Image: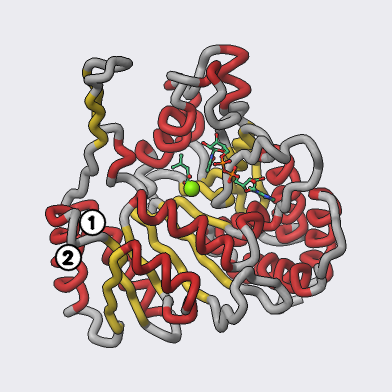
Amino acid sequence: MVTTVKLAVIPGDGIGPEVVAEALKALDAATVDSGIEFDRTEFQLGAARYLETGDVLTDDDLAAIKSHDAILLGAVGGVPGDPRLVGANIERGLLLKLRFDLDHYVNLRPSVLYEGVRSPLAEPGDVDFVVVREGTEGPYVGNGGAIRTGTPAEVANEVSVNTAYGVERVVRYAFALAASRPRQKLTLVHKTNVLVFAGSLWKRTVDRVAEEYPEVTVDYLHVDAATIFLVTDPGRFDVIVTDNLFGDILTDLAGAISGGIGLAASGNINPDGTFPSMFEPVHGSAPDIAGKGIADPTAAIGSVALLLRHLGEAEAAERVERAIAADVAERGDRPRSTSEIGDQIAARIQALQPAHS
Ligand SMILES: NC(=O)C1=CN([C@@H]2O[C@H](COP(=O)(O)OP(=O)(O)OC[C@H]3O[C@@H](n4cnc5c(N)ncnc54)[C@H](O)[C@@H]3O)[C@@H](O)[C@H]2O)C=CC1
Ligand SMILES: CC(C)CC(=O)C(=O)O
Ligand SMILES: [Mg+2]
């Protein structure tokens, strides 16, 4: 019997469509002759659509996306500072709206330094950790405003929202993940010394849930110190749990130390299964390299592995991951185009036969 998965594909802007095309090659290669097939619908959303039509995300778009089983997204957003996009709020009105409305409260961002990949760190050691970034709260919720805008007396607020409900559910997810990994370690990253109200809620929640996981070693770092240790001793991290803003920043750094942002995959997960989860590279639309065919599609392909694992297709996910590991191990300094990398990873995926065949 073949299971059909309804997949919403949002290529987006800049390098988004370039890397999504390669991710779809990997998805096809991983699921050829398998028990799963993808019924794909493409949604043209992002800065380009906004400039053409004035729409960011209509109610019809949202309803249609919700009717799918999963989402694959490239990246959205134009050139930072483009005056035509001021006020359009593509990131908040599209990307964050999807994450919030589809209750993607876990933003899962693994970092592995694959063998053969060069890190900018002289002695990176064993880099293998996962950032569990809260995805629906924090300073990204749009709880703010400004007065006297444009005058010397302007005041702008952007208030971070942290609820007991929201913090507890992501902390519980992070503990369960830590308990399932060999090193069983969880690090809370926050700024409890200054952000005392939110910090206290996060710390108390971690301490309380920790009592249910005696096998998990719990550590705490202020976010500024965490940036030091990510660079000087990344091997100390296993699972990091943190808020939306800190997680956003730390995962670009994590991508950089693990060989580059072009390798960093992510999943916006709704663990309850009420809404479709969304898989995307950590990076943005990279307008500086868009259209040149030089974007690294590995992060988007890695996001396909996360998608497959989320759908319960562990064997196919593993083949994608093994193909990526084999590809990056042999990269060296040889320049390859986006499509060359995608073709070669897809060929490796196909060559790795399923264990049962
Ligand atoms: N999930 C999303 O859709 C995200 C969207 N954005 C949006 O993307 C636009 C550009 O944002 P930036 O801050 O410049 O971040 P960015 O991640 O797009 O680019 C930062 C740097 O990394 C490089 N880079 C990114 N992905 C790469 C890849 N796959 N291969 C090789 N190099 C890569 C870029 O060339 C650039 O030099 C903005 O409009 C921003 O709001 C930013 C982050 C995430
Ligand atoms: C709109 C931003 C929150 C996107 C981003 O930078 C991210 O999710 O990493
Ligand atoms: Mg980011």
Q: Which residue is mark 2?
A: 205
Q: Distance between the Cα atoms at labels 1 and 2?
A: 7 Å
Q: Which residue is mark 1?
A: 167
Q: Is residue 6 visible?
A: no
| Mark 2 CB within 8 Å of ligand 2 | no
Question: Which residue corresponds to the image point at 42% horizontal and 65% vertical from the top-left?
Answer: 227
Residue for point 56% across, 83% down: 125
Circle 1/circle 2 CB separation < 8 Å = yes
Q: Residue 44: x percent and y percent? A: 62, 27
Helix, strand or loop for disc 1 = helix
In the rendered image, the quadrant that contains the N terminus is bottom right
Q: Nearer the viewer, residue 160 or 46?
A: 160
Query: Quick one: 148 or 69, which is closer to the camera?
Result: 148
Tell me if the residue at label 1 has its CB under 8 Å from ligand 2.
Answer: no
Note whether 114 is above or below 49 in the view shown: below
Instruction: Using a 10 Å C-alpha cutoff, classify the residue at mark 2 as few (fewer than 14 neighbours), some (14 to 19) or many (20 or more).
Output: some
Q: Position of residue 36 (x, y in %)?
A: 65, 56
Q: Position of residue 286 (x, y in %)?
A: 64, 40
Displayed quadrant of residue 334: bottom right
**Residue at 17%, 79% in the rendered image:** 211
Residue 288 picture location, percent across and down: 69, 38
In the displayed structure image, the side of residue 218 where residue 278 appears, left or right: right
Q: Quadrant of the C terminus?
A: bottom right
Specify the farthest residue to the front: 152
Query: Label 2 is placed on what type of residue?
Result: Thr
